Image: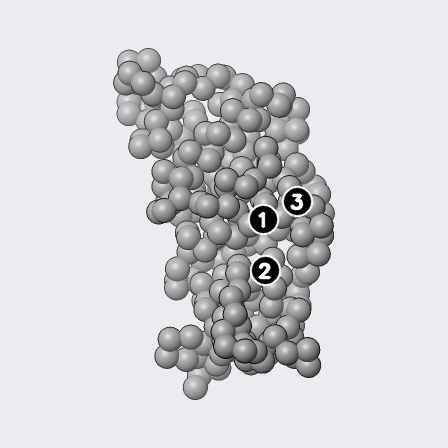
């Protein structure tokens, strides 16, 4: 069996048999990987604690027919303990890894991998409010996947301006001439907040009033559910 090595983030795990576990990972160069970690649930396992969600690892695997087999694991960064200790960070991290799993496949996606690692690191270090980190991650991850939202120009006629209508289907704001009845209307402060989430303007984001942040979070959640197949179950449990 061919042997390969990569960096990866553990997205989720589930038990297999009495002692094994199937681990779903997002790797830097091999895309999403599903592998069997044999004997990992035994107390004598050498790398059981290293294969938990939110861990960043250096992993060596044997290539299998349907599932690869974990051969060796080294910890690169351990974010799980700090994230799990805070409910807001934990629910945000759960939504983040669920998004990463849904947006990635077998093909290499270094941008998605690095974005995921950065989001988990920021949550573990409490660099910003967990809801801001989550919303920024969601918009950026969707952008990398090809669904970049537009907050600066009309999504139909490309007219620049501070447009207030937002279309989930068209992926951005619309001017008064192009907007249709029943479209969501966003306030200028909310639109600016959404644009700041895309660019990582944390000074503006942290200065936003609570109502603006909540309004923007609603838009981000709805936009994510629209574009991600079957939606995100974990978003229902996120603290806002």
* Along the line of sight, the residue nearer the viewer: 146 or 73: 73
Q: Position of residue 121 (x, y in %)?
A: 65, 51
Graded by Cα atoms within 10 Å as few (under 14), some (14 to 19) or many (20 or more), the crowding at tag 2 reads: many
- Closer-to-camera residue (117/45): 45
Looking at the rendered image, the quarter that the C terminus falls into is top right
Farthest-out residue, front? 18
**Residue 147 at x, y percent in the picture:** 38, 41
Element marked by disc 2? loop
Q: Tag 3's secondary structure?
A: helix
Query: Secondary structure under badge 1?
Result: helix
Look at the image and tell me whether residue 105 can be seen: yes
Spatial distance from mark 2 to mark 1, Cα to Cα?
A: 9 Å
The mark found on residue 93 in the picture is 1
Judge whether 84 appears above or below 5 on screen.
Answer: above
Residue 27 in view of the camera = no
Q: Residues within 10 Å of mark 3 (few under 14, many from 20)?
A: some
* Disc 2 target residue: 53
Which mark is on residue 87? Answer: 3
Q: CA distance from mark 2 to mark 3?
A: 15 Å
């Amino acid at each position: 069996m061919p042997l390969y090595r990569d960096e990866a983030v553990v997205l989720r795990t589930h038990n297999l048999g009495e002692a094994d576990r199937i681990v779903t990972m997002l790797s830097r160069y091999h895309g999403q990987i599903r592998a069997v970690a044999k004997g990992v649930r035994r107390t004598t396992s050498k790398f059981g604690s290293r294969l938990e969600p939110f861990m960043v690892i250096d992993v060596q695997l044997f290539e299998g027919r349907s599932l690869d087999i974990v051969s060796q694991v080294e910890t690169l960064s351990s974010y799980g303990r700090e994230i799990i200790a805070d409910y807001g960070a934990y629910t945000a991290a759960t939504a983040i890894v669920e998004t990463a799993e849904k947006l990635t496949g077998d093909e290499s996606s270094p941008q998605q991998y690095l974005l995921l690692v950065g989001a988990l690191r920021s949550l573990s270090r409490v660099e910003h409010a967990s809801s801001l980190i989550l919303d920024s991650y969601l918009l950026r991850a969707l952008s990398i996947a090809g669904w970049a939202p537009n907050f600066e120009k009309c999504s139909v006629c490309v007219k620049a301006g501070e447009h207030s209508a937002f279309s989930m289907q068209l992926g951005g704001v619309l001017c008064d001439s192009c907007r249709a009845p029943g479209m969501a209307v966003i306030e200028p402060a909310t639109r600016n907040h959404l644009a700041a989430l895309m660019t990582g303007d944390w000074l503006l984001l942290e200065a936003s009033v609570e109502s603006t942040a909540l309004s923007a979070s609603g838009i981000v959640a709805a936009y994510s559910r629209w574009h991600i197949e079957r939606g995100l179950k974990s978003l229902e449990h996120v603290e806002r």
